[in-house]
Image: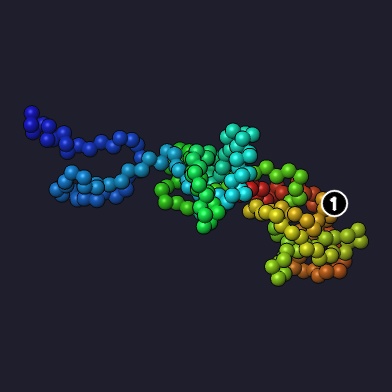
Amino acid sequence: SLAQTHLQFTSIKAPFNGIMDHFQGRLGSVVNEGDLLTTLSDNSQMWVYFNVPEAEYLAYKEQAAADNVVNVKLLMANNEVFKYPGVVKTIEADFNNETGNIAFRATFPNPNGLLRNGETGSVLMTVPLKHVLLIPQKATFEILEKRYVYVVDAKNVVHQREVNISSEMPDLYVVKDGLTSSDKILLEGIRKVKDGDKISFTYEAPKQVFKGLKVYSE
């Protein structure tokens, strides 16, 4: 019976399913109590830690109060959005005095095991934007750290105009001022014209333009 008891200690069973790291020992090696044999990770759900500035934190809390549950998305290292949205589960108690950020933790389902421990990415938090003017980033150009667009007037003449950007998305800018919803801006060929040029163009409706753009916010 003593031998049978000792034999039972040679069988090790994991308490859960997961992904096993490489084995630390060799076949036949002597191990002692407390020795690390391997690491087993439960990747069915993944915790993603990220820091949020104070302004975005306040916007999140306002939305969470209205919707109760706010989903977040994960932009992976290959610039693709992870298929399954996550939910913020934990927010630290205090802001970091040096960075002005507060730490969040979101939980993402990971049924296909695509996400692994140690991966990096960007968390995309959806914040509703009401009554704002959006323009494609590729319609703008920069001169001396200022952002400009070409506005087309009624006579098909382009005019360089400075725009102030309040926030940005992967393919879009939110315009604070400098444009109105009735303005027509040049989308293609902005490097081929200059202020005052008369052009011929084909008008494309905003909805059609946005179909080819990433419009999720971060």
Left or right placement of residue 81 versus residue 3 in this view: right
User: Which quadrant of the structure image shows residue 127?
Assistant: top right
Look at the picture and state if 106 lies above or below 163: above
Q: How many marks?
A: 1
Query: Residue 207: x percent and y percent?
Result: 76, 46
Residue 33 as seen in the image, left or right of residue 194:
left
**Residue at coordinates 41% horizontally, 41% vertically from top-left?**
43
Q: Is residue 122 shown to the viewer in this render? A: no
Q: Residue at x 52, y 57 (%)?
A: 98
Other residues around mark 1 within 10 Å, as few (<14) / some (14–19) / many (≥20): few
* Relative to 24, 48 lies left or right: right
Residue 120 shows in the view:
yes
Q: Position of residue 181 (x, y in %)?
A: 82, 50
Q: Return the residue found at the far right.
A: 155
Helix, strand or loop at mark 1: loop
Q: Which residue is mark 1?
A: 182
Residue 19 in picture, x, y percent from top left: 35, 43
